[in-house]
Amino acid sequence: MSPTKADTARNYAGPGDVAIDDAVIGVMEGQYGDRVRQLPPVALVIAAYNEEGVVGPVVHNLPAQVCGRQTATIVVADGCVDATAKEADAAGALVADVAVNRGQGAALRLGYRIAREGGARYIVTTDADGQYNPAEIANLLGPVIAGEADFVTGSRRLGSEETKDPVRQAGVRFFAAAISVLTGQKISDTTFGLRAMRAEVTGAVQLSQPQYQASELLIGVITHGYKVKEVPATIHKRRVGESKKGHNPLYDLHIPGVNNLFYGVRFSRVVFGTWWRERQRASGPGSASPRSEGAAGSAGLGGAPEAMANGSPTAASATSTVSLDDLMDESSGPATPESGSR
């Protein structure tokens, strides 16, 4: 499985990452053979970093079928120095064991590529730390299979959560409001790790961020004209290990607020950097997106052009002018920043 020219142009920051992924995929093909070359319709993709003792039960509890379609689990062990890769393999996952830690974004990008090139039609992402409920996967994948959406993300603000960190709650409210204003499509939870999408979506948008990929993927999907939907979902407290989010030079000191501050600054950079990049793309020559070719362009990045689902035209999500004040004043349930094993 070698990268296509389109993948290289859209999904990779440089040839170094391409070479790393090529080598990892080569090892996987030698280890798993047709299991990785001929995937079932649904690929469950997990990015994991030092999740020994957690990832095994997570993989074991994932469904063998979703919405009547067979699944395969792909775990990208991102530079792990523990037994994460071995444990995930023993639980039945196809493991991409990457020697160097590059970040969740790079790990998921590799997982998406393995899924696409292995023939999976749908991709579902979840985390390695057990915070998401596998029973809810069908609720996310169902609308994609039915052609009602190209990309479905869970939302704790529409559903429920067990975490109560007020800083993180405020952070997700802020970023949800910011992305809603920038894209013109109302989003309540921009960082939920349980998501479902058509596999081709991940090859059509640019995914060059090594970390904090949730916003890059979401903004890219919206601005390319794909139909996006949110559904209520649940996030549980992490019961084993600790979150890897916001890792920074002062991380191990556990100073209250410092990790959240680092996370917020870096996440903001990705959000606004991605939005600006997509704005330039949309206004440049030959900017018709894979899902909106021939359709009238949106005003700025605030409109979603006509999308196609399962080969048939469907109206893209209705968008309207969204004000920051309106979004920040909402009284819907609490939210926290990007969750999961990272």
Image (cartoon, grey):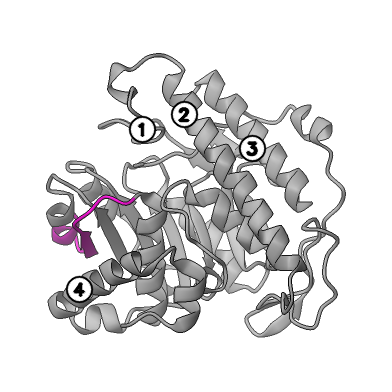
Q: Give the mark nearest the N terminus, 4 or 3.
A: 4
Viewer-side residue, 310 vs 18: 18
Residue type at the position of mark 4? Met
**Res. 273 visible in picture:** yes
Q: Is residue 254 left or right of residue 137?
A: left
Helix, strand or loop for disc 4: helix
Q: Which residue is mark 1?
A: 247
Query: Is disc 2 in contact with disc 4, using a CB cutoff of under 8 Å?
Result: no
Q: Position of residue 1 (x, y in %)?
A: 31, 83
Q: Is residue 160 left or right of residue 229?
A: left
Q: Give the mark nearest the N terminus, 3 or 2.
A: 3
Give the label, 2 or 4, closer to the camera. Answer: 2
- Circle on res. 298: none
Q: Which residue is mark 4?
A: 28
User: Magenta residues?
Assistant: 88-102
Mark 2 surroundings within 10 Å by alpha-carbon count, few (fewer than 14), some (14 through 19), many (20 or more): some
Q: Give the mark nearest the N terminus, 2 or 1.
A: 1
Task: Report the residue at 18% width, 82% height from top.
Answer: 33
Q: Which residue is mark 3?
A: 175
Give the label, 1 or 3, closer to the camera. Answer: 1
Helix, strand or loop for disc 3: helix
